[in-house]
Image (tube, rainbow, N blue to C red):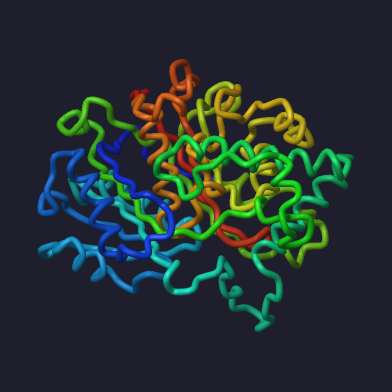
Amino acid sequence: MSSHGIKDRVAIVAMGCTDFGEHWDRSADDLIIDAAGQALGGAGLTTDEVDAYWFGTATTAMSGIALSQALKLKAKPVTRLENYCATGSEALRNACYAVASGAYDSAMAIGVEKVKDGGYQGLNAPPIPTDGTQRTLTAAAMFSLVAPAYGDKYGVSEADLREVLARIAAKNHYNGARNPRAQFRREVSMETICNSPAVAGRLGLFDCAGVADGAAAAIVVRAEDAHRYTDKPLYVKALSFVAGNGSGNADPDYDYTTFPEVVQAVTDAYAQAGVTDPRAQIAMAEVHDCFTPTELVLMEDLGFCDRGTAWKEELAGTFELHGDLPVNPDGGLKSFGHPVGASGLRMHFEHWLQFRGEAPPERQITTVQDRKLGLVQNLGGYPGEMLCFASVLGPELG
């Protein structure tokens, strides 16, 4: 796989992000107006001054009219898109390409999901239409297969693996406890996590991300125009996306200890951005921690450590808030829940805060002072039939 990329051709000049949670008293329109208003205010723009809009939502709306109506847009192109849990990231990718192509001077990417009051209980996407066979496993059950596979392959004992997964959950809840936008803002003890009710396989309640409402938005312009809107833009170094062909579940050699689509997407993204040593060059990463074993495997798929060693790095605190490579400093899906259309843009919002030095002091990481690249990884689907988005961002050109 290869791509030309658009390194340093566009920049994010403003972002907005609502609180994520159970918004019983706010409509999808309210969330859209909040996130878009923050972004527009940050850039000093009106809706009329943004040329085009990319609108990500999986279940809340069917067309661009939902955004156009909420923001009272006047004759603007609004593209509604959906691509599983990478929907918000896909909105950003398409907005960036539209500006980089020269078709527009500015674009907004915005994602929203309002699901709690509809009785939505969690992710269970319809099967890929091939042979008519219906999947009978939930998302939690599918991802639960990763934990024993990893332990068996790398000789990690049941007790050690339980501690590793609990540490991932505890880390993300620790970070989320320091984030006013997070759905769950309490630290959770290792004992509570390990003794939580079982959900699927070896996964307990605190191994699983929650369900939430929320919205997030970004305004993208050409890189050479960025300083007209802000003195601290965030430049797009790489955008990559891979949709797998779903063959993993039919492949007897697929062992559930890696996500090939993630490796393919991030390899392409690193090539676009010129990243040759992710552990040394990446200052922070927001990754798709839908379940704790997912984050464990991602640390190896993203090149942050060698195969079979991520569990030791987790125990050593490498990926904690003040570790060598902070992962999910905003609290991740574990603390934010997962409003599908908004999650990918929420991950970029954390880079926006951290690289600009605007994260709350108790959550501001220090690695961004020396390393000037951050990674967003966002996936959808299940082990064996997955899609993955990856972007690399940075506050400096070059």
The residue at 39%/48% (across/down) is 345
Task: Say if residue 222 shows up in the picture.
Answer: yes
The residue at 21%/55% (across/down) is 52
Q: On the rendered structure, is 18 left or right of 103?
A: right
The residue at 85%/41% (across/down) is 159
Q: Position of residue 269 (x, y in %)?
A: 50, 39
Q: Position of residue 192 (x, y in %)?
A: 70, 46
Above or below for 138 versus 333? below
Q: Position of residue 57 (x, y in %)?
A: 38, 64
Q: On the rendered structure, is 357 left or right of 335?
A: left
Quadrant of res 222: top left
Q: Position of residue 304 (x, y in %)?
A: 64, 31
Q: Between residues 366 and 184, which one lies in front from this camera angle?
A: 184
Query: How many numbered circles does the render carry?
Result: 0
Quadrant of res 26: bottom left
Above or below for 60 versus 285? below
Above or below for 48 versus 281? below
Above or below for 185 versus 343? above
Q: Residue furthest top?
A: 370
Q: Residue furthest bottom?
A: 132
